[in-house]
Image (cartoon, rainbow, N blue to C red):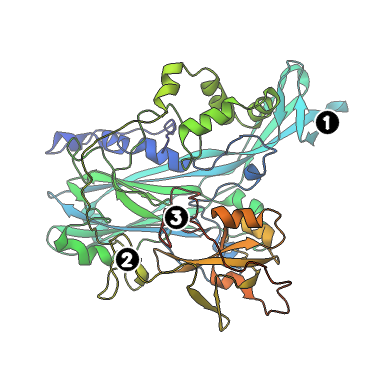
Amino acid sequence: MTGTGGVSGVTCTAVSGDDPSEDRPGDAFAQVSGVADAVLYEGYLLYPYRRSSAKNRVRWQFGVLLPRDWVEADGPLAPGLSGSADSWYQQTECLLRVRRPGALVRVRVRYLQMQHKQVRAAGTAGADQPVESLRTDDGTTHLTFDEAVPHEIAFERPLDELLRDGCAVEAGAPPAEETEPLPGGAGRVVRRREEVRALTTVAAERLSEDMVRLRVRTEHTGHAPDPRAPRGEALRRALLAAHTLLGGDGVEFVSQTDPPAELREWARACRNEFTFPVLGGGPEETEPAGRVVLSSPIILPDRPQVAPESPGDLHDAAEIDEILTLRTMLLTDEEKAEARATDARAARILDRVDSMPPEVFARLHGAIRSLTPAQVSSPEPAASPSAFPEAFPTAERPAWWQEGADDGLSPTTDTVPVDGVPVGGGSRVRLRPRGRGADAQDMFLEGRTARVAAVFHDVDGSAHLAVTVDDDPAAELHGWYGRFHYFRPDEVEPLAPADAGPADPDPTPRPRSPRPTSPAERPEEGRLDGRP
């Protein structure tokens, strides 16, 4: 995973305490700042960093909190661990151990607010008009585009207060408009932000003398002017890439991924929805555990780290830095010019790549961290078993990360019932992606017919159908090397043989392991660690 520069405007004040390491809250949050910033800007702008690129017309896919009436226009929202579906809230629950009286809890809620950059060309009589692009006399091209501004809401409360009354803090962002004149009187650039309304509530529940369950919930509290508006319009009032940092004095956070045996039942009862908390910090032998938590819409392991070889963020943590840097180097001069005009962050990426010393580039080729054999652990899960039954071990089936969890699963022959019809490999379906919560790019496939290649099971107990689209000229090639579109069973309609068109001369599906497309997706023998 690659990191970005920190968010400006944040100050930290030292707090006295028994442990000197606890006197520097900024140091604790700094442990995860690189990873947190990578989460904040994940997918902000993707290679080739040009406005004209199709992938940069459908942006912001993680931690998106929208008005509830817009999200639920097509029905109630089904919660999950991953924040890759549009939601109107996030909820984090985790355990903390009280180390001394007078303990303090610190919370930081971070997100991006969309900002529309409109280029306006000067006209007659002082009037101007909106344009898509404008080239000024100094040779610079200015493009109309959507940017984003980072926001961070930081506060702290005594743990005793949270146990007694809880607290609620406004977490929204005000509207704003900024104007930048262009050289030579050619026009101006107007940047406009809509108001974002949000509320963060924090509460604590005592489980024993020294154990507490902490709940942090951030909700979008605004209303959509039009609940049926396109997603691009709704995003103007959304929290983008929302996530939470937790720290404190006199407290120690417990891993939700690998809790101690005596705390596993309490960890199981924690409800994490559209975000998942992991411990921050460096290697266990050098960093104390439990000082800070990152609750991210992208599922991460405990102690996530930015690779020291990574020279800077590329906004696509699922890609390998070396490959993406090479591809960026190979952009034509015209493509680089458009990328620079698209966004200031794209310009900084190009500057860094174009000026990268050979020794820095050589380090991107990889590094061996250790030759010590890995020690396999069997952590217990962190969510409620009643909410996600497949994610928890039972007498019949172990947890998804344990050996034998995939026994009995067969993606090519398994079926799931859809409207009373068993659907599996070889079935023909019509695609009906949900209007809310679906992958934005899947919306382009509405009404198309497809063939199911396999059935995969998610860590939260849900099933997904891997399909190839019938009228895709590359459908056979996609099926051969395992590049599929993924839909939930409630997003397809089974087709009768008469509706399915001519039979495939070779109906035997040939699925391969799906290629991960985000940090939240890790294929494992018929299971996906994240939502497709």
> Which residue position is annotated with label 2?
405
> Which residue position is annotated with label 1?
127
For residue 417, side relative to residue 392 (left or right): right
For mark 1, give the secondary structure: loop
Tag 2: amino acid:
Ala
Q: Are marks 2 and 1 in contact (CB under 8 Å)?
A: no
Circle 1 crowding by C-alpha within 10 Å: few under 14, some 14–19, many from 20: few
Kindly report which numbered mark, 2 or 3, lies closer to the viewer in this rendering: 2
For residue 380, side relative to residue 33 (left or right): left
In the depicted view, which residue is nearer to us: 447 or 455?
A: 455
Q: CA distance from mark 2 to mark 1?
A: 67 Å
In the depicted view, which residue is nearer to us: 56 or 122?
A: 56
> Which residue position is annotated with label 3?
199
x, y percent for residue 484? 57, 57
In the depicted view, which residue is nearer to us: 274 or 115?
A: 274
For residue 472, side relative to residue 262 (left or right): right
Q: CA distance from mark 3 to mark 1?
A: 40 Å
Q: CA distance from mark 2 to mark 3?
A: 39 Å
> Which residue is painted at 73% across and 72% down in the image?
501
Going by the picture, which residue comes out furthest to the bottom? 420
x, y percent for residue 414? 47, 73
The vertical placement of 471 against 63, above or below, is below
| Residue 510's disc number | none
The N terminus sits in image quarter: top left
The vertical placement of 332 against 165, above or below, is above
* Sequence-wise first label, 2 or 1: 1
x, y percent for residue 374? 23, 45
Kindly report which numbered mark, 2 or 1, lies closer to the viewer in this rendering: 2
> Which residue is painted at 56% across and 84% down in the image?
420
Circle 2 crowding by C-alpha within 10 Å: few under 14, some 14–19, many from 20: some
